[in-house]
């Protein structure tokens, strides 16, 4: 984990047991992983329980594969991904594999099938992923709460038919719950061979002492719960897990401050100065938030861009954390259309290096040309989409897409500046810093940032739509009033100006694509950037009818036909006059 100041303090005590019970073989499977260091901070602690479907020919194999594969693959997912994204991707792949293996059996959906529950504890939150009829409970302040809902139907006394399980269908629907953590919380994961045979009073009786019991007592407590279920007549396999939160994972304030102050800001730099083997060639940009230089390595002459934090923020932990995040994000995004962060040896100072891309940014290009040719604007937008998709595949939002942050070069169009990025996996890690939510440039930010509504890849899509509109017209699609909107009523009064009214060379279908991308309501935008790219690349007949009538009600086709007829009549009259 790159941000050392976010190192998790999450601490738990665990216990688990699984027994065959009165059956011949144990179709249940359980597993708990408590990592340390970076994996603990980025991914958290995971407990998994699965109960192979008894009617399935390979239910036993399915449950054991599900537990071992999830514990392995979840920790192999990108550290930028959120818990929900990581778990969902793993479960989708696991479900497809189990379903495919099950096709060797004669009965559809009855091959490799298992119930599945996973509990993920990360920072100060818990996530529960649930399919089937195994259960997850939480005991807090002597109140036992069932978190999950059984995916089964009663077909007789103590007989139930599963409506959901891993491996029975290609389409998988997983329940996901997110809960806050408190010290002393006790989570219980149990298969139906346990929970179907214990009354609520018995749960409370046996779990009552668990909150204060030594960690070594949790395994015997699991055994006592299984013993009671057997005494009550359980005829199934029995499995249970207990996870008690000793301390949630929020970093302490002093850890945060010490971590972000680990490296000092570089001294003021000027041409000729050398820092860690990089010689300053020329200053490129200086703002209130950062200083940017063109540098050259003294050994091989490699050129790069060095970005240093502004001295104005030496005592601002939130700013420093975001500066650290910028290099970390850039090093994890691989695309020909995203500027590459250069990995260098550890430095005594706080700065980062990005590949040098010769060429103007789009803001400079617009100042020179006012607006671009349609084909050039299309080409730029398609390359930016390719770069954005690389961010979104990592569960990262750029959040500051604008002309200043896109370099136009002979090699490729490249997105730069990752200082405003939202990283789903990191945002789940608690930190006692005053983090900003709206970080981008106001004219390009989607309305949801101002309205404090949920953000998504469609928020970046809005910024891209505004950018493409500006490349074609030199204007904002909603005019200068957009920047002053602060409430839903303000946004509702905005009116989109078709781009072809400002630039008659813009095709109707291209304007239709832009209008959808910049819809005020994010639900009305494209569900995927690939669909927007398709509508930018070629005409979509559904977008052809958007052009408003010209003054006087004339349509372009009618106008040209009228002019052609008038010209023909004029030529005829001229010929008649000359023949006399």
Image (cartoon, grey):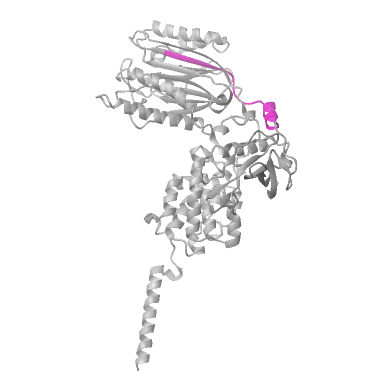
Answer above or below: position of 516 versus 202. below
Answer above or below: position of 553 versus 177. below
Question: How many numbered markers are drawn?
Answer: 0
Outermost residue to the left: 106
Q: Position of residue 488 (x, y in %)?
A: 55, 47
Q: Residue at x 50, y 40 (%)?
A: 392
Residue 513 inside the magenta-drawn segment = no
The N terminus sits in image quarter = top right
Residue 245 inside the magenta-drawn segment = yes
Q: Position of residue 578 (x, y in %)?
A: 37, 91
Q: Position of residue 541 (x, y in %)?
A: 37, 56
Q: Residue at x 48, y 62 (%)?
A: 500
- Horizontal relation, residue 42 to residue 261: left or right: left
Q: Is residue 456 shown to the viewer in this render?
A: no
Quarter of the image for residue 328 reads top right
Outermost residue to the bottom: 580
The C terminus sits in image quarter = bottom left
Quarter of the image for residue 154 reads top left
Q: Is residue 93 shown to the viewer in this render?
A: yes
- Horizontal relation, residue 281 to residue 194: left or right: right
Q: Position of residue 419 (x, y in %)?
A: 61, 42
Answer above or below: position of 31 versus 206. below
Segment colored magenta: 239-261
């Amino acid at each position: 984990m790159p941000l050392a100041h976010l190192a998790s303090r999450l601490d738990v005590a665990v216990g688990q047991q699984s027994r065959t019970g009165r059956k011949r073989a144990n179709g249940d499977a359980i597993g708990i992983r408590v990592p340390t260091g970076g994996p603990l901070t980025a991914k958290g602690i995971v407990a998994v329980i699965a109960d192979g479907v008894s009617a399935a020919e390979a239910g036993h194999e399915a449950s054991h594969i599900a537990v071992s594969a999830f514990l392995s693959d979840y920790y192999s997912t990108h550290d930028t991904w959120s818990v929900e994204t990581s778990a969902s991707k793993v479960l989708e792949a696991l479900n497809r594999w189990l379903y495919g293996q099950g096709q060797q059996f004669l009965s559809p959906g009855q091959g490799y099938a298992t119930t599945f529950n996973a509990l993920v504890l990360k920072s100060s939150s818990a996530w529960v992923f649930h399919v089937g009829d195994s259960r997850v409970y939480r005991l807090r302040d002597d109140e036992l709460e069932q978190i999950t809902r059984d995916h089964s139907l009663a077909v007789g006394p103590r007989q139930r038919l599963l409506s959901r399980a891993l491996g029975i269908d290609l389409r998988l629907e997983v329940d996901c719950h997110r809960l806050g953590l408190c010290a002393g919380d006790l989570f219980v994961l149990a298969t139906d061979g346990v929970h179907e045979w214990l009354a609520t009073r018995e749960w409370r009786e046996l779990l009552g002492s668990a909150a204060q019991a030594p960690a070594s007592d949790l395994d015997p407590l699991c055994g006592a719960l299984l013993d009671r279920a057997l005494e009550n007549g359980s005829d199934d396999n029995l499995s249970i897990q207990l996870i008690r939160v000793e301390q949630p994972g929020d970093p302490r304030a002093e850890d945060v401050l010490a971590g972000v102050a680990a490296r000092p800001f570089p001294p003021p730099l000027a041409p000729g100065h050398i820092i860690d083997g990089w010689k300053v060639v020329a200053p490129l940009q200086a703002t209130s938030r950062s200083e940017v230089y063109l540098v050259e390595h003294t050994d091989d002459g490699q050129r790069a861009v060095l970005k240093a934090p502004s001295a104005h923020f030496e005592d601002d932990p939130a700013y420093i954390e975001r500066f650290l995040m910028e290099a970390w994000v850039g090093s994890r995004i691989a695309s020909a259309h995203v500027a590459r962060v250069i990995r260098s040896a550890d430095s005594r100072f706080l700065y980062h290096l990005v590949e040098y891309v010769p060429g103007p940014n789009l803001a400079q290009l617009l100042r020179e040309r006012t607006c671009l040719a349609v084909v050039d604007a299309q080409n730029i937008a398609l390359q930016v989409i390719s770069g954005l998709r690389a961010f979104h595949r990592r569960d990262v939002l750029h959040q500051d897409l604008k002309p200043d942050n896109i370099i136009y070069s002979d090699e490729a169009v490249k997105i730069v500046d990752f200082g405003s990025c939202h990283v789903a996996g990191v945002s789940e890690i608690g930190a006692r810093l005053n983090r900003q939510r709206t970080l981008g440039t106001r004219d390009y930010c989607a309305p949801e940032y101002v309205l404090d509504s949920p953000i998504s890849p469609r928020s970046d899509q809005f910024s891209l739509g505004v950018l493409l509109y500006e490349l074609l017209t030199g204007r904002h699609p909603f005019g200068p009033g957009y920047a002053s909107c602060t409430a839903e009523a303000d946004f509702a009064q905005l009116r989109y100006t078709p781009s072809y009214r400002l630039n008659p060379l813009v095709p109707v279908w291209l304007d239709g694509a832009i209008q959808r991308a910049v819809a005020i309501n994010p639900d009305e935008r494209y569900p995927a950037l690939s669909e927007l790219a398709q509508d930018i690349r070629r005409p979509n007949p559904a977008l052809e009818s958007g052009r408003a009538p010209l003054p006087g009600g004339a349509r372009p086709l009618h106008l040209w036909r009228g002019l052609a007829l008038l010209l023909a009549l004029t030529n005829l009259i001229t010929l008649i006059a000359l023949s006399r």
